[in-house]
Image: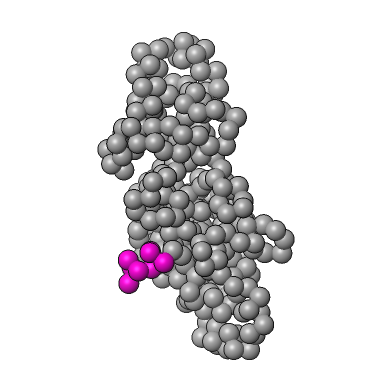
Amino acid sequence: MAHHASGVLLFLLMAFSFAGSAFAADAAVLGRKAGIGAVAEEEPELKKAAPGKYAVIFDAGSTGTRVHVFRFDKKMELIDIGDGDDIEVFAKVEPGLSAYAGRPQEAAKSIVPLLEKAKSTVPRWLMKKTPVKLGATAGLRLIGDEKAEQILEAVRDAVHSKNCTFNGAWNGGGGPGQADLYVTSSFYYMAADVGLIDSEATSGKTTPAAFRAAAEKICPMGFVEAKAAYPKVRSVDAPFICMDLIYQYSLLVDGFGLEPTKEITVAQKVKHGEYFIEAAWALGEAIEAVSPTKRLNDA
């Protein structure tokens, strides 16, 4: 976990299309002109067997880079993907992009196996329409802005992408104004650790005001007192409880503009259709990427 206020909340996102994506001359190219159109006509039985919309999300974390591939039906419900009953295709490579400081081309090539994994999952006739996004945590900045930009630029150039931003909270796929707001990652762990929700539950209801109230109670405490009062907090995180709670309250209220009394769901897992899955930014970003509202706004 942590420490909670850093890393997990800030992402640098680059959106790019499967079409025309290549990392090197010898790498397989998605959306190659010789493939997509012909496949759709030559393999109609395969097209019929794999309906739905796909989204590919790359999570470039500090220790490794992961790929998540999701598949949705027309109602935006998750449906089975891959060979079994899974609702997500997942793969990981190590080390993370930050390990390639000063070697940006190697950083770009490091995610080729993940791109190949995604390529083997998404039907060829849908590749051109499949959104792909890469998110790099703020930890990449620890190697220095210049080296981080070199890495991001190498990946960006390789996949013909563009910059955008993401802030670690998502609205469950219902578009702006949806009543149920989900916050994940450090919000969940902090709420569970300090007793705002049941630590044994995978999700719970709370408010931004509860984070502030907890901060007002904890901030006057010393390390020993705080650790004794909140034994679920790891020793390495205990010195930062006050700061983390204040940061999370400020992010929700000042950053996202929530009322302090707004009820939110902090979640480790959420129910989506018939599945309970990890509540992570990758799923939220996938839902947003393929939602009809998103495509309308981008038109």
Q: Is residue 254 above or below residue 233?
A: below
Residue 249 visible, this angle: no
Q: Position of residue 77 (x, y in %)?
A: 54, 59
Identify the image quadrant of the C terminus.
bottom left
**Residue nearest the observer in this picture, 99 or 208:** 208
Q: Answer whether residue 178 is magenta in the image.
A: no
Q: Nearer the viewer, residue 284 or 239?
A: 284
Residue 26, image x, y percentages? 58, 75
| Residue at the spot 38% in from the left edge and 64% down from the top edge | 293
What kind of secondary structure does the magenta stretch mostly adopt? helix
The boundaries of the magenta stretch are: 292-299
Location of residue 187 in the rendering, given as x and y in whole percent from the top left corner? 45, 35
Task: Name the residue located 31 percent from the left edge and 39 percent from the top edge.
Answer: 258
Q: State the residue in front, 27 or 5.
A: 5
Q: Is 81 left, or right, of 110 in this rendering? A: right
Can residue 82 be spotted in the picture?
yes
Q: What residue sits 49% from the left and 23% below the top?
A: 195
Q: Considering only vertical position in the picture, is 214 above or below 86?
A: above
- Residue at image location 41% in from the left, 44% down from the top: 181
